Image (cartoon, rainbow, N blue to C red):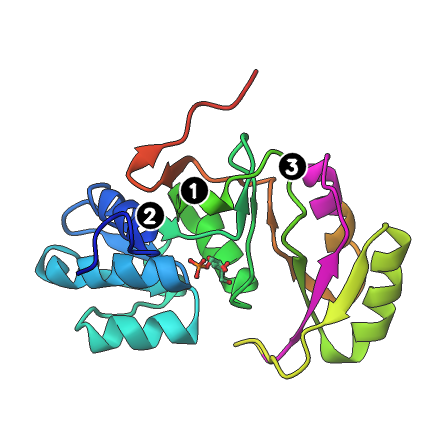
Amino acid sequence: MTTAATDPNAGKRAAAEAALKEVQDDSVVGVGTGSTVRFFIEGLARMRARIEGAVSSSEQSSALLRAAGIPVLDLNAVGPIPLYVDGADECDPWRRLIKGGGAALTREKIVAEAAQRFVCIIDPSKRVEVLGRFPLPVEVIPMARSLVARALVQLGGQPVWRDGTTTDNGNWILDVHGLRITDPVGLEREINQIPGVVSVGLFARRPADVVLIGATPMADPPR
Ligand code: 5RP
């Protein structure tokens, strides 16, 4: 029998269930990508008659949403959306995130930007004091892979090409190892300025508004 103590997904499920309480009737819901979001989509399916539809951050989530009978809407057709729910690979005490383990970082960043409220759902293993233990994903235009990699080395990282992965946008991913990110906003800005970078998986300029660690909201950031 699976119990909360033995279920490795208990934290993810609990966070996803807690996030469902944030969904407003008749609204459009922004939906992220990954194994935690999969539980959120399962819950959304149960309440699909109460929502207008979803804006999705990946082909993977779009397929899950459609299979659950939830209309997938074009962001251009809906404008600002009240709520975006997504997971993360790391989260610091200021709700700044590393995302992109599932290679969906660019569309995730777009939907997060369009959202009035970004609720991040994680299990306790994702909570860190300083971002960077998880390799930082950077989506690059394929012809610029080596150029961008050299620039990332100049910034102190060790980029590794995620060989065999092509993003939903037709691009490639560099995973940057060895960073200790003490200025996430500055590093996000700096990496964004490298020609050939499509986006970086640092969500610091626009952090999450709420982080649910399992069912528990994370404490307010230190002052
Ligand atoms: C995908 C992401 C995911 O949110 C992140 O990788 C966390 O995934 P999971 O919920 O499976 O641990 O950023 O690009």
Asked whether mark 3 and ligand 1 are closer than 8 Å, the reply comes as: no
Residue depicted at 86% across the width and 50% down the height: 156
Query: Over which residues does the magenta segment extend?
Result: 170-189
Q: Label 1's element?
A: helix
Image location (x, y in percent) of residue 56: 37, 65
Residue 181 in the magenta stretch? The answer is: yes
For label 2, the SS is helix
* Disc 3 crowd, CA 10 A, few/some/many (<14, 14-19, 20+): some
x and y percent of residue 16 in the render? 28, 50
How far across and down, in percent of the image, does residue 203 sit?
Answer: 57, 46
Q: CA distance from mark 3 to mark 1?
A: 15 Å
Please, what is the three-letter code of the amino acid marked with disc 2?
Gly
Give the answer, above or below, for where 77 lies relative to 181.
below
Between tags 3 and 1, which lies in front? 1
Q: Which residue is mark 1?
A: 124
The image's mark for residue 11 is 2
